Image: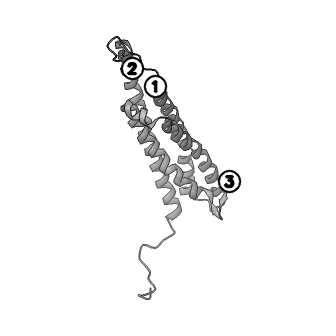
Amino acid sequence: MSLLNGLPAHVLLVHIVVVLIPLTALALVAGAVWPRAARRLGVLLPSLALVALVSVPLTTQAGEWLERHVDDDVLVRRHTELGDGLLPWALGLFVLAAVVWWSARGPRQQDADGGPARAARLTALPVRIVVSVLSLAVAAGAVVDVYRIGDSGAKAAWHDAYSKSAHSERDGS
């Protein structure tokens, strides 16, 4: 996919990544830290992460097409290099989202008084802590990477495309 309605697909697809990666990161951390949130999110959590994951290579591929159709520039090359590093973060979000969803939907063991079995509580807490820490780290890494990529893309697109002083037809400038 290279053009959509005559516009480079990258400039349109990038908005999907910019919205879905941070949204997925937020939902992942909420679900990892609060099992009740993971249960309420249900299959939406891994589905959102899957759409975010799929959108990354589509956007990258469209960006590579666009790179071949613009002037060679150090800022464009930097943006391209940074963009190539987002896929592992998106994959990490997806894998952890699937783990959080799967663990939240697992069967609930109960003891004689109807509460969760003591053994299940003891093993679940360390696992939940590890998954929560990993989720927070991957979510933060993904969001920071999206910010860095977006910042470099904005600089590449706008570094010489505007004037610092305003020009108006009314004032004759």
Q: Nearer the viewer, residue 42 or 86?
A: 42
Q: Which residue is mark 3?
A: 1
- Secondary structure at badge 1 equals helix
**Separation of residues labelled 1 and 3 (CA atoms):** 37 Å
In the image, taking residue 56 as reference, residue 171 lies left or right, namely left
Contact? badges 2 and 1 (CB < 8 Å): yes
Q: Label 3 sits on what residue type?
A: Met
Q: Label 2 sits on what residue type?
A: Ala
Q: Position of residue 10 (x, y in %)?
A: 59, 56
Hey, which quadrant is residue 124 in on the image? top left
Q: Position of residue 35 (x, y in %)?
A: 38, 30
**Separation of residues labelled 2 and 1 (CA atoms):** 9 Å
- Secondary structure at badge 3 equals loop
Q: Position of residue 116 (x, y in %)?
A: 36, 17
Q: Nearer the viewer, residue 76 or 57?
A: 57
**Between disc 2 and disc 1, whose residue precedes?**
1
As drawn, the residue found furthest toward the top would be: 112
Q: Nearer the viewer, residue 140 or 115?
A: 115
Picture layout, residue 141 above or below residue 103: below
Disc on res. 103: 1
Disc on res. 124: 2
Picture layout, residue 39 above or below residue 111: below
